[in-house]
Amino acid sequence: MSTVPAADSQTNAGKALAGHDEHAHTSSFLKTYVFSLDHKIIGLQFLFSTLIWFLVGGMLALGIRWQLAYPWRPMPILGELVGAAEGGQIPPEVYTMLVTMHATVMIFFVIIPVLAGAFGNYLIPLMIGADDMAFPTLNMLSYWFMWPAFVAIGSSFFVDGGAAQGGWTNYAPLSIFAGQGQTLWLIGLTLVGISSMLGSVNYMTTIIQMRAPGMTMFRLPMTIWGMFVTAVLQAFALPVLTAAGFMALSDRLFGTGFFLAEGATANNAIAQAGGGQPLLWQHLFWFYSHPAVYIMILPAMGMVSDILSCFSRKPLFGYKPMVYSLAGIAGLGFIVWGHHMFVSGMNPALGMTFMVSTMMIALPSAIKTFNWLGTMWGGKLQFTTPMLFAISFVSMFIIGGLSGIFMAATPVDIVIHDTYFIVAHFHYVLFAGTAMAVMGAIYFWFPKMFGRTMNDSWGKVHFLLTFVLLNCVFYPMHILGMNDFPRRLADPYHYGTFRHLLPINQFMSWCAFILVSVQIIFVVNFIWSLFFGPRCGRNPWHANGLEWQAPSPPGHGNFDFQPMIYRGPYEYGSPEVEVDYYPQTQPPAASSPSGESNENPTKEA
Amino acid sequence: MSESQTNEQQRKWLPNFWSVLFLMVPIFGVATFALAPYLNDIAPAYFKRPVWFPKDVSEHGYVIDNLFMFILWLTGIVFVITEGLLFYFMWKYEANTNTKKVAYSHGSHSLEVVWTIIPAVTLLFIAIYQMDAWAAAKMRAPDIPPIVEVTGRQFNWDFRYPGPDNELYTSDDIVRTDGRLYLPVGEEVLLRITSADVLHSFFLPNLRLKQDVIPGMAQNMWFTATETGEYDIVCAELCGWGHYKMKARIHLVTRPQFEAQLEEFRKEKNTMRVADRPQD
Ligand code: HEM
Ligand SMILES: [Cu+2]
Ligand SMILES: [Cu+2]
Ligand SMILES: [Cu+2]
């Protein structure tokens, strides 16, 4: 769209600051780009790492899809790469490993770190007007704790018996009896947890303590609210997972038996001790992992809100209801974990209470959706690439949210639990939702990160293909789920009940192969634009957010002026100014009769 | 000159293209469900079977199917309305199409109230509406002795029937490891289900029942089958590399046939023959 250099409202005194990085410190390359304390470098480190793991996770998914389309047929080309034996055939244990590791990589190495690690790191100080995070060293450590995790999980593919095969949910007792890979999996997860915890402490402190003058909590962009609530969720939920992980480790290594019943045997191993409860693992795991699904979407919701408002050229509809529903999701998110356990053997009366709380958590999600629609209503929509991704987030989140209601209905969940209906649900919220929002966010903030814009036309081609193909892959999963097609089966078709579903699966698999292949457009566009994209000014989108007032890319210390904040981030189309945006730092026009107009969300539409 | 013309044209059709793309979401979304039963009409004969719920041979199954359909209709309506609005806003308010000034609005208190209350009431209604079906399926166990004990183990389902004394866990029990479960139709039956090693899930698609089994913990499952026939028993919880092949069959037979089958098992037990596993 419009790539006119920004109306730099600030002086250009800071031009020199952009190059500040190189000469102000006598730091080596290592210190600047590897062990950097700068939140922007750390954010980019997270971004590049997660993009590479995204590729790995995608490859693993291709193995799954091949097996579901052509069970036991040797997989061409990729077969050996994804761990198949003998000329590419995928044996059942490898299939189980693929399912486990695809989810593990995507959740713990891609979605969680790309939201909090990459965008959280990059955007928080810039959007609140700070020169860096509150604890830069902690911040660096949060990235470097990912590496031992990468090594643990990456190397687990090569140990005897292969990587973990217990599902990403790691259910006991299977996970206690499983091979070496499972130990590495637990260690990897614990390290990811440490990284997240270091990050979240830092984010909370930074957002509370380091806001620029005038940046009140209710002038924060939704992205920051999303990051803040996520950090709170993480801080309270993660310790439970870490404790559970240590218990599972000690069950495996020292035979403590926290999660084992008396005399349990499996895989020819006998538990030395009993007296534990397999269900305890599930309670502890989901006590973290349900909040974790919100950790995987709230920042995305925030970024989508910002993008939608910017390209609707209109204030965000219902800012405060948006913030309150974020908080509502976070609060309710702690009392719904049992909905993953309706048929686990948990007390059915408890199931009923979890059902009610789960139904209620759909409410804040609905409120957010209506407010996004309200934001677009009456605007002047610009269909840029980031905008298309943001709109698709809304469209797809509706599907994912509505399918949640089926599963929250306990009698229905008896049938569809552990079928492809669940798989459809979480791919709509996580892939069609979060992953699409992340791509939109990359197109949106790329100019800020690298001072160049990505190609918009190729961006749209990428969007179109991704959007169409992902629906071809994931929408039919609802239908499979209706047919009770179970998940995680290496060969479902030897059941007469599911044999007729093979043709649909082949269709889905082919769409999946193409879906992964077309991401090459994105990769090429990304890399090409890094070096040859057209240069842009500070504010190529004419956005209000504070980050757009800093140089692109911002130098060390971020701002070349002391930011003063006069209003919220969504003053698009304000009658007070000539242009259709009104940056947060622009002093109010002297003649303006009312300077406080932006904080009035109850104004009639 | 010509370049600006193409630009002009692009500006006209591209926005419409994007809004129509999003219009396809509700259209294909609804069509997929509406046409699902017929999807396999074009598939080879081997696959010909309606793509829909598996056949239901239980007394309670229709409650679950109806609840699914009820939620499908309800969410379907919400889906069409919200996606329709999304399309309409994209169509109407595209920057070049919408010549009016933007609506400089920060929200609407009354709208917020409306779209909080309506979904809240609807969700609460669904929550209360389904409670009875859940209680019937998982909480109101009938007061009858178990007709069989089911044990999941890697990777087989074992069945233990009481002997003539009608009591489980006595010396005259019949234990079958051949993966065939025989049960009578037309009467309520109670099953004890448990696991010997890891988690499994005892899943009977045609009876609309599923229950995870847990080592060291016995649970009850009950139902009334309405039709004789032979159906799949599926393991629905990841239980190791052989999870996919942990298959068994349930034979729903009349009461006299059931008695005769047990009698045959008893004879077999005395001759100590181990039966073959079923092929299909
Ligand atoms: C509208 C609100 C939502 C409701 C009512 C809801 C409900 C549920 C329920 C009941 C389950 C368990 C189903 C089962 O295993 O039988 C489930 C699973 C899941 N949900 Fe949601 N959900 C909602 C939103 C979300 C969001 C926003 C995300 C993620 C960003 C999410 C991610 C997941 C995942 C990953 C699982 C599956 C975990 C697994 O078994 O592997 N859900 N959801
Ligand atoms: Cu959940
Ligand atoms: Cu099993
Ligand atoms: Cu299994």
Image (cartoon, coloured by chain):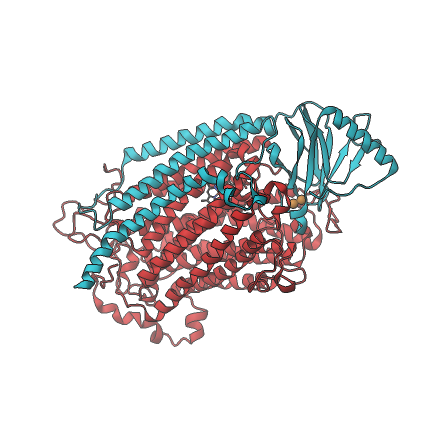
Q: Observer-nearest residue: B119 or A280?
A: B119
User: Which residue shows up at 47% across the image and 50% down it?
Assistant: A473
Find ligand 3 in the image and state its quadrant.
Answer: top right
Q: Observer-nearest residue: B16 or A251?
A: B16
User: Which residue shows up at 15% across the image and 53% down it?
Assistant: A578
Location of the N terminus of chain A by quadrant is bottom left
Q: Which quadrant of the structure image shows residue A117? A: bottom left
Q: Is residue B5 left or right of residue A248?
A: left
Chain coloured red: A
Q: Position of residue B241 (x, y in %)?
A: 66, 52
Give chain B's shade: cyan
Q: Observer-nearest residue: B21 or A267?
A: B21
User: Which residue shows up at 26% across the image and 46% down it?
Assistant: A315
Residue B43 visible here: yes
Q: Position of residue A588 (x, y in %)?
A: 18, 52
Q: Is residue B257 left or right of residue A595?
A: right
Looking at the image, residue B184 lies above or below residue A72: above
User: Which residue shows up at 29% across the image and 63% down it?
Assistant: A559
Q: Position of residue A23 (x, y in %)?
A: 34, 76
Q: Position of residue A285 (x, y in %)?
A: 57, 46
Looking at the image, residue A605 lies above or below residue A119: above
